[in-house]
């Protein structure tokens, strides 16, 4: 009887270790996915001043848009929680979209090689961001499912795992600039 009890206890301990390791892997995947988003956001933040400079020469009276984009970039970079950062990043993307649309009002700007390269780079970054956000949200969904599913939830609660936050766009169906 004692041997059977020890075998059952050993099996339970082994199962708990396996479940714990899966939770760790899922949490690390979610963190890595967030790091991928952060890389793309950093790239966008690095290109934003260049875009603002390129547009400034052509659009002196567009100062409000330029100032708003610059301020949003600063605020988004210092945001502390995911929901706040997601909202600010959405506003920044909209502002960048307005800047990119200025080429219709300024034919010389449209012909500027620097502006065209910045425009292509920013559109590529937005595409990468869309993919990275979907991957991140998939990782969050997987972790959250595991945390809520039996028997994983027992190990998750004992080990203090918390649900991940989804990266949600402010306006549904928003398209990149």
Image (cartoon, rainbow, N blue to C red):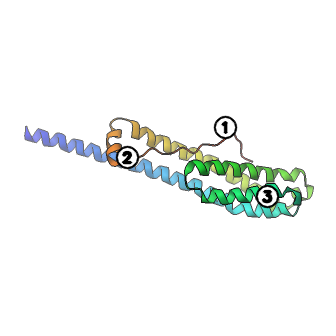
Residue 138 locus on image (x, y percent):
52, 42
In the displayed structure, does residue 38 sit left or right of residue 124? left
Labels 1, 3: front one = 3
Q: Which residue is mark 3?
A: 66
Q: Quadrant of residue 143?
A: top left
Residue 7, image quadrant: top left
Q: Would residue 18 be visible to someone looking at this image? A: yes
- Work out whether mark 3 precedes mark 2 in sequence or the reverse, and give the earlier one: 2
Between disc 3 and disc 2, the foreground one is 3
Q: What residue is pinned by disc 2?
A: 22
- Of marks 2 and 1, which one's residue comes earlier in the chain? 2
Residue 17 in the figure: left or right of residue 96 = left
How packed is label 1: few (under 14 Cα within 10 Å), some, or many (20 or more)?
A: few
Distance between mark 2 and mark 1 Cα atoms: 32 Å
- Residue 122 in picture, x, y percent from top left: 72, 55
Residue 127 visible (yes or no): no
Q: Secondary structure at mark 1?
A: loop
Which residue extends farthest right? 107
The one of 77 and 111 positioned closer to us in this rendering: 77
Q: CA distance from mark 3 to mark 2?
A: 46 Å
The answer to the question of whether label 3 and label 2 lie on touching residues, with beta carbons closer than 8 A, is no
The residue closer to the viewer here, 57 or 1, is 57
Count neighbours of disc 2 (C-alpha within 10 A) and say few if under 14, some if 14 to 19, many if 20 or more.
some
Q: Looking at the image, do the residues carrying marks 1 and 3 touch, with CB atoms under 8 Å apart?
A: no
- Furthest-top residue in view? 150
């Amino acid at each position: 009887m004692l041997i059977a009890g020890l075998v059952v206890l050993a099996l339970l301990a082994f199962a708990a270790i396996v479940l714990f390791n899966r939770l760790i892997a899922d949490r690390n995947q979610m963190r890595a996915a967030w790091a991928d988003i952060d890389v793309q956001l950093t790239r966008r933040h690095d290109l934003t001043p260049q875009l603002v400079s390129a547009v400034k020469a052509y659009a002196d009276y567009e100062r409000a848009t330029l100032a708003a984009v610059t301020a949003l970039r600063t605020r988004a970079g210092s945001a502390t929680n995911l929901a706040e950062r997601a909202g600010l990043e959405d506003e920044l993307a909209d502002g960048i979209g307005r800047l990119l649309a200025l080429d219709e009002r300024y034919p010389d700007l449209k012909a500027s090689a620097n502006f065209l390269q910045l425009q292509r780079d920013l559109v590529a970054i937005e595409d990468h961001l869309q993919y990275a956000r979907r991957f991140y949200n998939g990782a969050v969904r997987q972790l959250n499912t595991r945390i809520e599913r039996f028997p994983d939830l027992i190990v998750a609660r004992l080990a203090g795992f918390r649900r991940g936050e989804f990266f949600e766009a402010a306006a549904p169906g928003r398209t990149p600039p």
